[in-house]
Image (tube, rainbow, N blue to C red):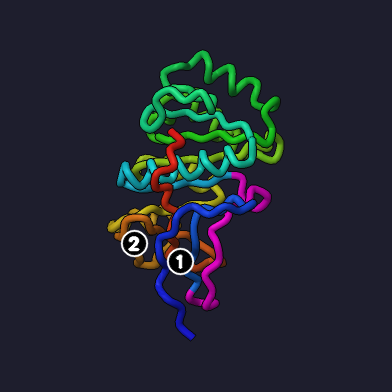
Amino acid sequence: MWLNPLSLYPVTCDTEFSIGYIDDYYLFTQPKLVFDFKAHHSYLFVGKSYQERENIVKLLLYRIKQRNQKVFMIDDLFCKNNTNINLIHNDNQEVLCDLFSNIKRNQNSYLFITDLTLFLQNDLYKEFLVKLLEMNQKYNIHLLLMNQSVVTIPYRILTLISCKISLSNDNVQEVQALFSTTEKCIQKKSGYGLVMLHQNLLECSFFQMGDIHEL
């Protein structure tokens, strides 16, 4: 029995860290796309569209706020001055180095880097991120990463990230590089993307924030 194509839905009120739906046409199901930090210590979003990345930023901050959990956000693109989060700019090396040095005090909190390319231009930041990815079981930090392209992400870091999600992208080579696959698959529709589940590259749709403002 064929399922209807995935639609775009407003953000739901639930207790899960869900951000959309997955179209699993292999199993004929459409489960929610739920973050599971017991299974994955880090999530990477890659998308060219500023608007789509902004929607994901709003959605993730909204979900974190629902849980009353602490988030440290390293951002120069989306948030201006938000008193609800710990907002740090990439050029504030003193504050960032202090955060890195005391990261153990912030277990179970979220570290959200919205421009990975800019962040990795600083060798100290890059060294910290590699350490955090390699030893996350020790630090227990929930990593949320975002970038405009996969091309600028070093291969070592890309392989250490446990879950990747593509926003709409019409570049086959970029999608293949992101998911380390030879499968030729793209997703061009706004609000939709691709995710790997059970070794299958599947279409997903993301909740739309609409008039809910979290930035």
Vertical arrangement, residue 32 with respect to residue 108, above or below: below
Q: Amino acid at mark 2?
A: Gln
Q: Residue at x 60, y 41 (%)?
A: 66
Q: Is residue 123 above or below residue 24?
A: above
Residue 7 appears anywhere in the view:
yes
Residue 116 is covered by the magenta coloring: no
Does residue 133 appear left or right of residue 149 in this picture?
Answer: right
Q: Residue at x 31, y 42 (%)?
A: 50
Mark 2 sits on what residue?
187
Which residue reaches farthest top? 94
Q: Quadrant of residue 177?
A: bottom left
> Is 28 contained in the magenta span?
yes
Residue closer to the observer: 44 or 72: 72
Q: Is residue 160 visible?
A: no
In the rendered image of this protein, does residue 2 appear above or below residue 83? Answer: below
Relative to 41, 173 lies left or right: left
Q: Quadrant of the C terminus?
A: top left
Name the residue nearer the viewer: 201 or 76: 76
Q: Residues within 10 Å of mark 2 (few under 14, many from 20)?
A: many
Circle 1 residue = 202
- Give the prevailing secondary structure in the magenta stretch: loop
Give x and y (percent) for residue 62. 52, 41
Q: Position of residue 204 (x, y in %)?
A: 44, 62
Q: Earlier in the sequence, mark 2 or mark 1?
A: 2
Q: CA distance from mark 2 to mark 1?
A: 10 Å
- Number of marks in picture: 2
With respect to residue 184, does 130 lie above or below? above
The part of the chain drawn in magenta is 25-41
Residue type for callout 1? Leu
**x, y (%) of residue 96?**
52, 20
Classify 10 Å Cα crowding around label 1: few (below 14), some (14-19), many (20 and above). Answer: some
